[in-house]
Amino acid sequence: MTTPQHIMAVASGYGLSRALLSAVDLGLFSRLAAGPMTASEICAEYGLLARPGTDFLDLLVSAELLARQGDGEDARYLNTPETAAFLDRTQPEYIGGIIELWAKRNFGFWNTLTEAMQTGRAQNETKDGGTPFFETLYADPARLEAFMDAMTGSSIRNFRALAESFPFSRYHSLVDIGGADGLLAREVAVRHEGLSITTLDLPEVTEIAARKIAEAGLSDRITAQSGDFFAEPLPKADVITMGMILHDWNLERKQALVRKAYDALPEGGAFIVIEALIDDARRENTFGLFLSLNMLIEFGDAFDYTGAEFISWCREAGFRRFEILSLDGPSSAAIAYK
Ligand SMILES: C[S@@+](CC[C@H](N)C(=O)[O-])C[C@H]1O[C@@H](n2cnc3c(N)ncnc32)[C@H](O)[C@@H]1O
């Protein structure tokens, strides 16, 4: 039977989404890691009024984003296995960093999605003459560090899957372009001992990478190199990786980076991008399509892309053989061989 349930679930989904973003932003799941709490304890902790506070908690329970022991006033709320693993700030696979950013910034910016689609203009701080987020980011060490942690949360499972499934040991050298705090380099280094590895990013970021590489005891295996991937040629290596880099830019800049990767590789070298690649028929990867519109909201002309699009840009640059590897959830690695 045809019913409107699916339509209404999606249409009202912004409320559930906002409730989850607020819960992460408040730090609720990290707090519950210490043990179950009643609604009145949670409301007292965060200054919530009793009725809306309880509705908020039970909305999350109804969506299986919180668990609850018992009913009524004495009921106690606790994490589900997923929220305990991924939304407690003390856990290594915490994904809340990016959700905190969505809570503070993107949720509001999406309110003018229709305008963004009509004008092709970013809807973030820059719309009202504010300083671009990324400019303020590099000037503020605490925010930059928080952004790096957010990237780590969204990328760690993909980088682990790639380090385990791609045969890096067949090659001698790897350069990770836009490597942020060196996460991909570190994940590959601990699994493939013979490889010489460089992680390249802007100078403010390279300092953080060098520190994290030293903390992991990998300073003799990984070089943290400062550079601007548009201003300079890429360092030469057998394998070049770019995690969530091409999706930040417009078509012209994407193609320029693909050509630079080609120039930096030897014959037989591999260029690997890690993204939430949209499926070629553009029917299935809801998260990839969401991210693409999020790039519109943040940058105006940036967008996510399909494996087929990546292959066509790479073929134009001279690459000859291609492969797509599924990684975690909606993400994939697309590989072009020179
Ligand atoms: C979206 S983050 C991706 C981080 C990481 N590769 C990952 O997938 O988790 C983009 C990275 O590109 C870096 N970046 C931006 N413009 C750059 C440039 N012109 N040269 C070098 N790095 C740049 C940023 O500093 C940031 O670390």
Image (cartoon, rainbow, N blue to C red):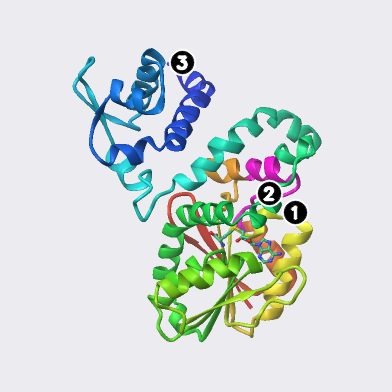
Question: Is 311 displayed left or right of 223 in the figure?
Answer: right
Q: Amino acid at mark 2?
A: Phe
Q: According to the image, label 1 marks what residue?
A: 250
In what quadrant of the picture does the N terminus appear?
top left
Sequence-wise, the earlier of marks 1 and 3 is 3
Q: Residue 285's spot in the image, x, y percent? A: 53, 44
Q: Please tell me whether mark 1 or mark 3 is closer to you in this view.
A: 1
Label 2's element? loop
Count the numbered circles shown: 3
Q: In 3D space, how far apart are the residues under numbered discs 1 and 3 (Cα atoms)?
A: 40 Å
- Marking on residue 3: 3
Q: Bounds of the magenta span?
A: 292-307
Q: Do labels 2 and 1 touch, CB within 8 Å?
A: yes
Q: Is residue 315 above or below residue 219?
A: above
Q: In 3D space, how far apart are the residues under numbered discs 3 and 2 (Cα atoms)?
A: 34 Å
Label 3's element? loop
Sequence-wise, the earlier of marks 3 and 2 is 3
